[in-house]
Amino acid sequence: MQFGDYRIEIIPDTEFRLDGGAMFGVVPRVLWEKKCPPDELNRIKMNMNCLFIETPNEKILIETGIGEKWSERETKMYGVFREKPFTQTLFEKTGYAPEDITIVVNTHLHFDHAGGNTISSQQSVKPQFPNACYFVSKSELEHAENPHERDRASYLPENWRPLQESGQLEVKPDNYEVVEGLKLQTVRGHSETMQTVKLERGGKKLYGFADLIPMRAHLSLPWIAGFDLYPTETLEAKRRLLKQALEEDWICLFYHETENPLCRLEKIDGKIKSIPV
């Protein structure tokens, strides 16, 4: 898809599964299972939809998926079903190899957003994108290095410390512009330091909600993941941003959606509905 002089592509990583009750918080299973049928372990199927943006000067990857450094036990626990490496999908969708990526952006450092930052190589871990600068907010990095009991399991240092060692990690402010028209903004809710993505180019607007609205099934205001540290702030952010998305005809990116991650929104019979792009 063209955004003026920019090109964008969605790079899906792989199927994985998390507990459905955790993904929908206070919403009863009898409601959420109609939209996301669970497996025998009560887990729902999800994906990770990374965003590739090619500008005249940069090749940018926003998020890197869950990565491929998982043990057999962890793969089974998270229901990871990988048909092919992420970099193969990247090449098939864009024509570019990992060496071609110049900027990698993480909205936050949870393992399902930053797991592909690095790869295992000869009993060590190294950056997967050797020529890229990796961007993450200073606030998020500080929290990742000092997580609390509530979210410690989501942060795996192997996903960012090798980038520090190689000199490729660049810390950023809470709100900043990656390139002209591409902005990262910290929005409290899922966590204190997670960022969302907004791209404005060629008269179009794209908004990546990251984990604020992880799937289309979370469009209803009270449907909020139990993982969120500040659910009432998630609620207010959703109220504000979805209103703006409708008014300004945003193309919305739902990071964990399994089908049709890019959608426009319409209000039908008082409810917000997603229309695949």
Image: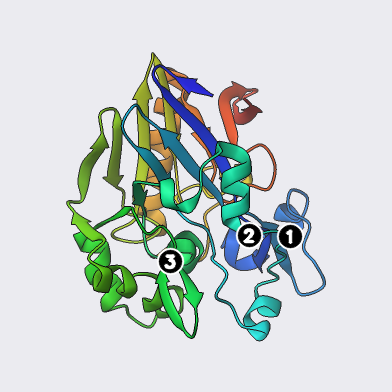
Residue at the extreme right of the image, as rendered: 40
Instruction: Examine the rendering and report whether any part of residue 8 can be seen.
Output: yes
Earlier sequence position, callout 3 versus callout 2: 2
Residue under label 2:
85
* Tag 1 and tag 3, C-beta contact below 8 Å: no
Residue under label 1:
83
Q: Looking at the picture, which amino acid does disc 1 mark?
A: Glu
At horizontal 59% and vertical 67% (from top left) the residue drawn is 22
Secondary structure of the residue carrying numbered label 2: loop
Of badges 3 and 2, the one in the foreground is: 2
- Residue 205 in percent (x, y) is at 41, 24
At horizontal 40% and vertical 51% (from top left) the residue drawn is 234
Secondary structure of the residue carrying numbered label 1: loop
Q: Which of 120 and 19 is in front in this view?
A: 120
Quadrant of residue 42 in the image?
bottom right
- Residue 78 in percent (x, y) is at 65, 73
Q: Looking at the picture, which amino acid does disc 3 mark?
A: His
- Residue 12 in percent (x, y) is at 61, 48
How packed mark 1 is, by other alpha carbons closer than 10 Å (few <14, some 14-19, many 20 or more), is: few
